């Protein structure tokens, strides 16, 4: 005997979307994992909106008008374009923006009370299946007598990485500019928050149509 489920198809897909968003939020070291999770998020966001349309039509006999939802943003518009691009034109790619922080006292002879200096660079991954962030900035000491660089590297106090979406079409570049950020983690978090609000709006709309009119 098959038992009835309390979960709709929308609930099921949204649960998967939430899971992928949560996994991506804590993945900050593996470029290939970030890229794959981003692709999964894009695919699931497309599946979610399609399932909602089908489910709404089957339950009400009416067409779901997503444009009536008041909280779409430039970020969600970017993800709509990413879905089309990922399916029909190019796979999604990312690059890494690295910042290295050095203690000023490790670079200069004078210790200035724990001050730091930061250097930033953006690296193409080269290998799209890279498990680790490629080596980036390498700061070399100078010979104090000649001023020429030596082979002795200065180790950074700490590093930070930002995984950056790389637009591959002029349309995506324009949409990314409107979104106001290129950080994959920030973009996914904002898109998920909007889709979560949209899911709540959708359920309210569905209940409103299903609710029988009072006599």
Image (cartoon, rainbow, N blue to C red):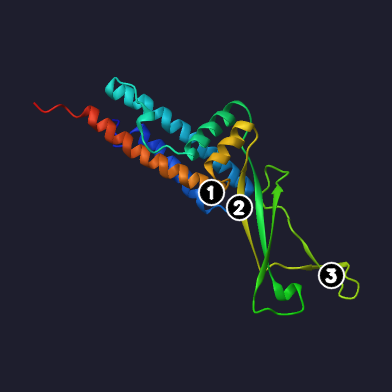
| Residue ID at (33%, 22%) | 57
First in residue order: circle 1 vs circle 3: 3
The residue pinned by badge 1 equals 185
The residue pinned by badge 3 equals 142
How far is mark 1 from mark 3, CA to CA? 37 Å
Q: Position of residue 153 (x, y in %)?
A: 79, 67
Q: Position of residue 126 (x, y in %)?
A: 73, 44
**Are the two marked residues, 2 and 1, in contact with CB atoms closer than 8 angstroms?**
yes
Q: Position of residue 59 (x, y in %)?
A: 28, 24
> Closer to the camera, 205 or 125?
205
Q: Residues within 10 Å of mark 2 (few under 14, many from 20)?
A: some
Location of residue 176 with respect to 31 vertically, above or below = above
How far is mark 2 from mark 3, CA to CA? 29 Å
| Residue ID at (59%, 25%) | 88
Helix, strand or loop status at disc 3: strand
**Which circle, 1 or 3, is nearer the viewer?**
3
> Closer to the camera, 169 or 52?
169
| Residue ID at (73%, 74%) | 106
Helix, strand or loop status at disc 2: strand
| Residue ID at (70%, 67%) | 156
Which of the image's four quarters has the C terminus? top left
> Is residue 15 visible to the viewer in this orientation of the structure?
no
First in residue order: circle 2 vs circle 1: 2
> Is residue 69 visible to the viewer in this orientation of the structure?
yes
The residue pinned by badge 2 equals 162
**Which circle, 2 or 3, is nearer the viewer?**
3
Using residue 20 as the reference point, say whether residue 51 is left or right of it.
left
Which of the image's four quarters has the N terminus? top left
Location of residue 54 with respect to 132 vertically, above or below = above
């Amino acid at each position: 005997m098959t038992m009835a489920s309390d979960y709709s198809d929308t609930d099921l897909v949204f649960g998967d979307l939430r899971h992928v968003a949560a996994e991506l939020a804590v993945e900050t070291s593996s470029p290939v994992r970030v890229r794959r999770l981003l692709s999964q998020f894009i695919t699931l966001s497309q599946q979610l909106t399609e399932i909602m349309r089908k489910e709404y039509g089957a339950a009400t006999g009416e067409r779901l008008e997503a444009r009536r939802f008041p909280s779409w943003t430039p970020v969600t518009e970017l993800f709509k374009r990413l879905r089309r691009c990922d399916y029909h034109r190019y796979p999604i790619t990312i690059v890494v923006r690295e910042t290295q922080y050095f203690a000023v006292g490790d670079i200069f002879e004078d210790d200035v009370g724990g001050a730091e200096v930061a250097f930033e660079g953006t690296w193409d991954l080269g290998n799209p299946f890279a498990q680790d962030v490629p080596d980036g900035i390498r700061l070399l000491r100078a010979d104090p007598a000649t001023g020429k660089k030596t082979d002795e590297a200065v180790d950074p106090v700490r590093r930070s990485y930002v995984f950056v979406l790389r637009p591959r079409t002029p349309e995506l570049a324009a949409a990314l500019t409107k979104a106001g950020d290129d950080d994959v983690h920030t973009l996914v978090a904002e898109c998920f928050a909007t889709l979560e609000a949209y899911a709540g709006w959708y359920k309210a709309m569905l209940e409103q149509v299903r609710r029988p009119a009072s006599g």
